[in-house]
Every structure is written in C-alpha cells, then in structure tokens.
Amino acid sequence: MGRVHRYLLSVMRDKGAGYLVLLDPDRLDPRKIKDVGRACQEGGADALLVGSSLLLGDTLDRVVWDLKEVVDIPVILFPGSSDQLSAGADAVLFLSLVSGRNPELLIGQQVRAAPKIRAFGLEPISTAYILVEGGTLSTVEYMSNTRPIPRDKVDVAMAHALAAEYLGMRMVYLEAGSGARLSVPEEMVRGVAGYVGLPVVVGGGIRDPKVARRKVEAGASFVVTGNVLEDGKLTPERVKAFADAVHLGGR
Ligand code: 1GP
C-alpha cells in the first residue's frame, strides 16, 4: 500500500471521514492557485483532487506544481482521461468507470496511463468509479457515453461495488456528476458502504455542509465538493464549514 493510500485510511480512522476539495484547472485563475491551496489546507481539507471530465486548457501541470509548493496535504489527480497526468502530484485515483460498459473507460485509458504513471513515480490508487443518476445530464455521462445507475437501484450499485472489491480495487467513488442537481442518495451510500469493505467516496452536487454530513452518517468515508467553492468562493471559513461537518470523529 502506498503512502497516500495509508494516509487516507488514517484520516478515516482518526477523523471518522475525510473531506476532499476538487479543483478543476479550467476554472482556476492561475494567479490564485496558491491562495486556493492555502485556503483549503487552512480550512481543514484532508487532500486536494485535481482534474475534470473534460479539460479545455493546459494548466493542469502548473496547478499541481503550484499547489505542491504551498500545501502539505496530498495532491491527488482525478483524471478524466490518460492525458490528465502530472509528475508533480502525490497520487492518482486510478479510475475504472465500472458502472458503464464502455471498454475505453474500463481498461483502454488505463493501459495508456499506466506506463506514464510509473514513469512519473505517481502512486496509483485503484478506484471503482460508479456514476449515479443526478437529475441532470452530467458532463461525465455525456463524455463517457455511459448510462448512470438509476437513483433507486441501490442493489445495482451494491453489486457493482462488490464486483470492484473482488477485482481488487481499493476504493469506491459514487459520483452524481459535477454540478448535479441531486447528490447520491443516502440510501445508496448506506447500501454500498454496508455491503463492501472499501472506503466509499461520495461526490457530485453537494453544496451544503449539512448534506455532506448526511453522506458521512450514511457511511461515506470521504466527501468531495467541487463547484460549490469555485469562482472565488473558496475561503478558509467555507472550507472549514465542510471539513467540520465531515469530520465526525474517530470510530
Ligand atoms: C465531481 O464529485 C465531484 O466529480 C464534485 O462535484 O462539482 O458538484 O461538487 P461538484
């Protein structure tokens, strides 16, 4: 097990659950990257995710290196494709979109990414990426050309997560899609978290610390927010409101 994976497990143990801030390089003013990183760390975020379903710009590398200059918490890539890799990061969520049936996103991109990940010395954290219907057509759904799991099909999500565990993956990411109108239902988080022994990450459409807390109470080990703190809204106080809501205390 790698250093970042061990760290994430220690966050779960010590704080009950962890709070991850997702930074989309396309939406970050390059002059403010370091301020954003400092604000995340000061507010109590446990790690930073960097990536997007679709990147138009070429600032990923700069974002990662700038963040690494100012934060001690891990900077983890959350790549929408094998192009979104940077040697400056600490780790990469090595995602397979297991809820879909698109071979390119189940194994194709991974084959392209693996040699680069090794050459960059990045720690891969094998993660089952499960797309859940979020009330809108999300970028990830559109770009991946896959269908999300319907919101009321908890058993379908559970079976996907268990298959991922049996395949040896290390985390499950339940994703409603960035900017989703509806976040992943608590019943689904509860069902999956109770069914598999893997940490469950929940993201997409979480705009309120109270909602973040409900995901943790349902069994989420990590909560991710992206949109809600974008466009100049990311202050240490706002990060802290989410971090405090997620950190329920050790188990
Ligand atoms: C998307 O889960 C993340 O991949 C975060 O979504 O931007 O809606 O917070 P939001």
Image: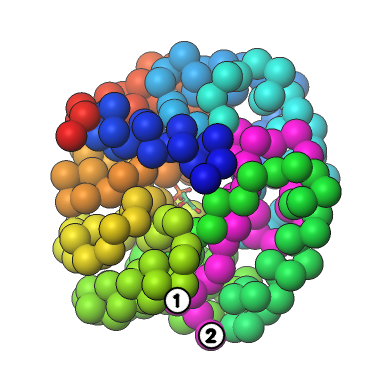
Q: Is residue 164 above or below residue 197?
A: below
Seen from the viewer's position, the closer of residues 225 and 166 is: 166
Q: Residue at x 18, y 51 (%)?
A: 218
Q: Position of residue 139 (x, y in %)?
A: 56, 65
| CB under 8 Å between discs 2 and 1 | no
| Residue matched to label 1 | 99
Alpha-carbon neighbours of circle 2 within 10 Å: few (<14), some, or many (≥20)? Answer: few
Q: Is mark 1 within 8 Å of ligand 1?
A: no
Q: Which residues are magenta?
A: 75-101
Q: Amino acid at mark 2?
A: Arg
In the drawing, does residue 16 fall left or right of residue 104?
left
Seen from the viewer's position, the closer of residues 188 and 35 is: 188
| Residue matched to label 2 | 101
* Distance (Cα) linking label 2 and label 1: 7 Å
Q: Residue at x 71, y 18 (%)?
A: 69
Majority SS type along the magenta span: loop
Q: Residue at x 56, y 68 (%)?
A: 96
Q: Which mark is residue 174?
A: none
